[in-house]
Amino acid sequence: MDDSLPAVDPDVAATAADIAEMEIRGAATIADAAAEALARQAERSEAASPNEFRRQLRAAAKTLYETRPTAVSLPNALRYVLRGMSGETVSELRASTIARAEEFQVDLAQAQSKLGEIGSNRLRDGDVVMTHCHSTDALSCLEAAVEDGKEIEAIVKETRPRKQGHITARQLRELGVPVTLVVDNAARRYLDRADHVLVGADSIAADGSVINKVGTSGLAVNARERGVPVMVAAQTIKLHPDTMTGHTVEIEMRAEREVVSDEERADIAGERADDGLVVENPAFDVTPPRYVDAIVTERGQFPPESIVILMRELFGETTGEPWEP
C-alpha cells in the first residue's frame, strides 16, 4: 500500500502558504479559511474511490495543520469538518464535507457576534480599554459596546515586530472610537488611564492559561499590579483540547527577518563572525490564569480556572487527530 500523501488542491496549498506567512491572520479568520480550503478540496476532488477521497482530505488537512502550530483554532476547524465527513460513496463524502464546512463557517460567524454581546456587558460608558495585538474577538466586544451607545476610548499597543496594533487602531477609528496608539514599552505608563485590558487568545489551555501574542503576559502582570482587570475574548474554537491530557502548547518561533533585515544583521555583527549573533522571535507567550479575570466566549464568561469544564463538555476527555492515517 502506498502511504505517501496525495497532492492537495492548489487552492489549499495557497491558503496554507497565506496562513504561514500571516497573510491570513487572526484565529477566527484562519479557522474560516481552513474550513473553506477543505470544502474546496472536496469540491474539486477527482478521487476514484471513497478511500482515495478520505486520503486527499486528510492530506489537505495535514498541509493546513502544519502551518501554524500554536493557533489551535486551525486544528479545531479541521477536526470539526473531518469528523462530519460521512457517506459510502465519493459523492456522499463530498456533499457531507462541504455541508460540514459551511455549517462551521456559519457557527463561527454567529459565535463572534454572541461573544461580542457578552463581552460588551463588562464594559461601561466612558471606559478606556487597552489592547494588545489584533483580535477580531476582542474587537467584537468593543463594536458591540459602541452599538449599545457606550462611549469607549482605546489605548492600542503597536505590538512589534509586525505592528498588528495598527490594524486594531484603524478598525477602531472606523467605528468612531478615539484611539491613542502607543509603543509596547509604554504600556505600564498608560495603564494608569485604563479601566480594562482586553486581549484575544490563540489558544487556551485546560488550566486556564492563555497563549496569545508575545507581550500579553507582561501586560497582564503589570495590569494586575495596577488593579486593572484583564479580559480575554476567545471563541471556543480557541480552547486547546489536547492540554487536558498533558500536551503542552508549542510556542511558534518566527523568522528573524521580521525583527532584523539581512542588512541590519550584517551591521550589528560588524566584522565579527555571524554565528555569535542569535535573533529569536517568539510569536506567543503564556499568561498564567492568576493574571486573568475572565475568559469571555460565545457560551458565556468564565473564570480561567473553570474553563476545563467547558472544554470537557465540548471535546470530551481525549481527542484524536482525524488528519492522521
Image (cartoon, rainbow, N blue to C red):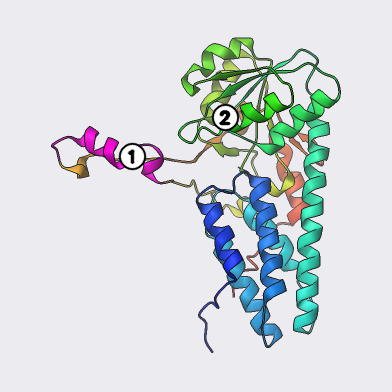
Residue 202 coordinates in the image, percent (x, y): 61, 43
Answer whether residue 267 is magenta in the image.
yes
Q: Secondary structure at mark 2?
A: helix
Please, which residue is most extreme toward the left here? 271
The amino acid type, in three-letter code, at marker 2 is: His
Residue 303's spot in the image, x, y percent?
A: 73, 32
Residue 162 image position (x, y, % from top left): 49, 36
Separation of marks 1 and 2 at Cα, in angstroms: 21 Å
Picture disc at residue 261: 1
State which region is magenta: 255-272
Of residues 270 and 128, the one drawn nearer to the viewer in this rendering: 270
Magenta residues: mostly which secondary structure? helix
Side of 208 where 69 appears, left or right: left
Quarter of the image where the N terminus is located: bottom right
- Asked if the magenta segment contains residue 274, the reply would be no
Q: Residue at x 76, y 30 (%)?
A: 141
Mark 2 highlights which residue? Answer: 166
